[in-house]
């Protein structure tokens, strides 16, 4: 379809893996790169807490996802697709996916399945490329970007499942400004396909997940997402990867922080000292003290934000600072210490 790029641009389609980068710019960069060999990498991992939309999409609409894969491969002039597969997801969907791979291989496309242990760092595209190449799963310095020098140093297009689902809808002229939301913490947890411009409050009410108790939410990318109080969700839309997690206002700060930093400490790739030691030390401080030393924790977060190698380490301050400001109402922030 020669005008698919323009259709993607007009649709305002952005990646749904979390970064929200315009899809048409990625496509244009890979297609225009001067290389005989190019790749598409499908990221089907979801290594972060609170995210489970991609497995829902693949279980319900595998043929649509593969239609998006075909459109992407045809546009960049490639027949090679690396499928990064969360091993648990593979067990649940292989009976659906393998017949589709066989069908597409019969049409000349080549698929390579890479089985990844679900990991947070696997959401960083250059870390994923390293893993597929057999290297340590850690991010690369950028530039160069994957669109010009990605998998095996070739131009590479990296998309998650929801993005490819949307690509297919654009190609079928069925795309609407909707997205998949992962809702947890309410009475009707699950995945919902609703307008992307709805407020958080409207999404919660429409899905019967609006709490009867005092609450706050964490949105976007689960543990790395922003925390908002119930008064802030009336006009705010969900960004990032599309998760909404509901917490009772009585949630103990120490318990919530331990959830976040036990995860970060476990999932840090270890490449850089600020992220590796910062996450571990915050988790250790929380476990050793019943009362939270906010000043010490904020100082560590400030170091991580300023000196971590990649965005995953830099963004750990977002949930903490927004939680302090919006829920706890403490007069302390990353910028004041």
Image: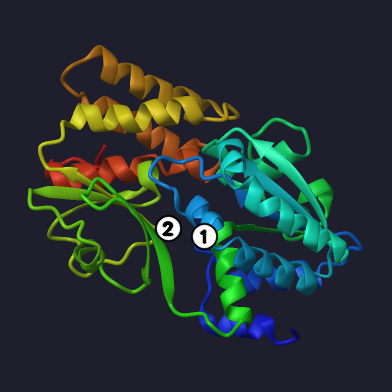
Residue sitting at x 66%, y 43%: 128
Can you tell which of label 2 and label 1 is closer to the viewer?
1
- Residue 145 can be seen in this image: no
Q: Quadrant of the N terminus?
A: bottom right
Q: Position of residue 14 (x, y in %)?
A: 53, 69
Q: How many residues crowd around disc 1 within 10 Å: few (fewer than 14), some, or many (20 or more)? A: few
Q: Residue furthest right?
A: 36
- Residue extending farthest top: 288
Q: Is residue 326 above or below residue 14?
A: above
Q: What's the residue at 37%, 46% (across, down)?
A: 222
Q: Residue 60 shows which numbered tag?
A: 1
Sequence-first disc among 2 and 1: 1
The residue lying toward the viewer, choosing from 295 and 327, is: 327
Side of 53 where 165 appears, left or right? right
Q: Can you say whether 186 is above or below 181 in the image?
A: above
Q: Is residue 159 left or right of residue 334?
A: right
Answer left or right for 100 relative to 265.
right
Q: Quadrant of residue 27?
A: bottom right
For the C terminus, give its image quadrant.
top left
Which residue is rendered at x = 64% and y = 85% of the image?
A: 6
- Residue situated in front as seen by the camera: 84 or 89: 89
Q: Residue at x 61, y 84 (%)?
A: 7
x and y, in percent, of residue 224 in the image: 39, 44
Is any part of residue 3 visible from this angle? yes
Q: Which residue is mark 2?
A: 240
* Marking on residue 220: none
Secondary-structure class at tag 1: helix
Image height of 127 relative to 63, above or below: above
Question: How far across and how far down the image is residue 103, in percent?
Answer: 79, 61
Distance from disc 2 to disc 1, alpha carbons, whole Å, reads 22 Å
**Relative to 281, is 27 above or below?**
below
């Amino acid at each position: 379809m020669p005008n698919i790029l323009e259709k993607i641009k007009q649709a305002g389609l952005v990646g749904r893996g979390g970064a929200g980068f315009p899809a048409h710019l990625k496509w244009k960069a890979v297609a225009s790169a001067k290389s005989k060999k190019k790749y598409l990498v499908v990221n089907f991992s979801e290594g972060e807490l609170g995210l489970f939309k991609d497995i829902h999409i693949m279980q319900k609409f595998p043929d649509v996802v593969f239609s998006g894969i075909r459109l992407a491969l045809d546009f960049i002039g490639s027949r090679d697709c690396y499928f990064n597969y969360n091993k648990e997801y593979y067990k649940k969907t292989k009976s659906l996916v393998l017949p589709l791979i066989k069908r597409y291989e019969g049409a000349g496309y080549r698929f390579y399945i890479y089985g990844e242990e679900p990991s947070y760092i696997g959401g960083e595209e250059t870390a994923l490329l390293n893993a597929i190449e057999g290297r340590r799963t850690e991010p690369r310095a950028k530039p160069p970007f994957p669109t010009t020098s990605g998998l095996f140093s070739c131009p590479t297009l990296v998309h998650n499942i929801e993005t490819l689902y949307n690509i297919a809808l654009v190609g079928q002229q069925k795309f609407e400004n909707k997205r998949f939301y992962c809702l947890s913490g309410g009475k009707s947890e699950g995945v919902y396909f609703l307008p992307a411009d709805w407020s958080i409050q409207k999404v919660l009410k429409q899905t019967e997940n609006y709490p009867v108790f005092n609450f706050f939410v964490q949105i976007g990318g689960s543990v790395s997402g922003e925390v908002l109080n119930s008064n802030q969700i009336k006009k705010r839309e969900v960004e990032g990867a599309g998760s909404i997690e509901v917490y009772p206002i009585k949630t103990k700060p120490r318990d919530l922080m331990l959830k976040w930093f036990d995860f970060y400490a476990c999932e840090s790739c270890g490449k850089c000292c600020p992220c590796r030691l910062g996450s571990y030390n915050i988790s250790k401080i929380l476990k050793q003290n019943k009362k939270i030393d906010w000043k010490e924790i904020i100082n560590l977060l400030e170091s991580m934000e300023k000196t971590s190698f990649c965005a995953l380490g830099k963004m750990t301050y977002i949930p903490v600072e927004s939680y302090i400001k919006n829920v706890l109402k403490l007069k302390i922030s990353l910028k004041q210490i």
